[in-house]
Structure formats: structure tokens, C-alpha cells
Amino acid sequence: MIKSIQLSDELLEATISFDNIKVARIIDEVHMNTVSILQYNNENSLSCVVTLAYYSAQKDYILHREFPAGKGFADIVFIPRKQSARQIIIVELKWNTTAKGAISQIKDKKYAGTLKLYQKEILLVGINYNKKSKKHECIIEKINI
């Protein structure tokens, strides 16, 4: 349990530090260690894995899955708690496409516009899982709205 919490802390710090490779590696590790092989190649499983992987973020954030934003629903949005100085994070998950496509969806569907009342600076995180290669990829960007 201690290892899982440490890994979760590392994941949040890697996200805030724009360490795409480390984020993908940690998501890969959590995915491998928590999901049955029967459910591994499932988009809902990936969403649950990401939520679980960011478990320790809950001390600074309120996590919202399928958050209504812009022209659709953002997969996961991290809204900082009142006592936190953290940035908003929008996570979009993709399956057999690209992390770049996830970032494009966040921008195209204007998910961040809904959140400008909270903050002007927002982190965008695109995570893709490739079923064939069994690899996760991540892209992290910062936008100002």
C-alpha cells in the first residue's frame, strides 16, 4: 500500500513537471498491476486505472469523471481544493489512437473554457493506450485561457 501511495505521489509530481515518459510508465505499471487480463483492453478499465493511479491527488484536488465541459465531457478533471495552490488538470483518455489526439479533443471541444472561472492556467493531459503494442503514451501541455 505504501508503494502504491508513493507511486501515486510520483505520478502527480511527474504530471505537474511535464514528464510525459514518467507519467506513461507509471500509468502502465498501475494498469498492469490492477486490471485482470480479461478486462485489460477496455476503455472503462483505463479510466478506472487513471483515477486509481492519481489516488493521492485527492488531498489537493476533487476529481470529476465525465465532467461536462465545452462541447462534451472531459474524461477526468482535477479541480484544486480551496486550500490548494495547484493548477486545474484536464485528462483525456484515448484508445488505439494517439495522446496528441486526446490533447486535440480537449482543445477542439473547448473543455478548458468551462473552467476559466476557476483559473487562467490549465494543464492538459492526453493519455493513449495502444492495444497492439500494450503501451501507454502521454502528452502534457499548459494553456492559458
Image (cartoon, rainbow, N blue to C red):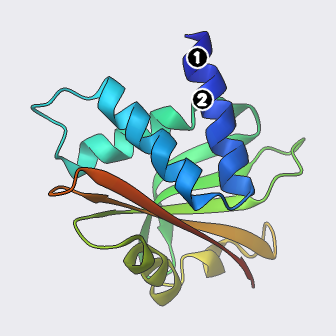
Which residue shows up at 67% across the image and 49% down it? 14
Query: Would you call the spot at circle 1 few (<14 residues within 10 Å), some (14-19), or many (20 or more)?
Result: few
Is 93 displayed left or right of 107 in the figure?
A: left
Q: Is residue 17 above or below residue 111?
A: above
Q: Is residue 85 above or below residue 130?
A: above
**What kind of residue is marked 1?**
Lys
The C terminus appears in which quarter of the rendering?
bottom right
Is 32 displayed left or right of 40 in the figure?
A: right
CB within 8 Å, label 1 to label 2: yes
Residue that label 2 marks: 7
Give the image location of residue 34, x and y in percent.
Answer: 33, 25
Give the image location of residue 50, x and y in percent.
Answer: 45, 43
The N terminus appears in which quarter of the rendering?
top right
Which residue shows up at 62% across the image and 11% down it? 2
| Cα–Cα span, label 1 and label 2 | 6 Å
Which quarter of the figure has residue 132? Answer: bottom left
Q: Secondary structure at mark 1?
A: helix
Is 43 displayed left or right of 111 in the figure?
A: left
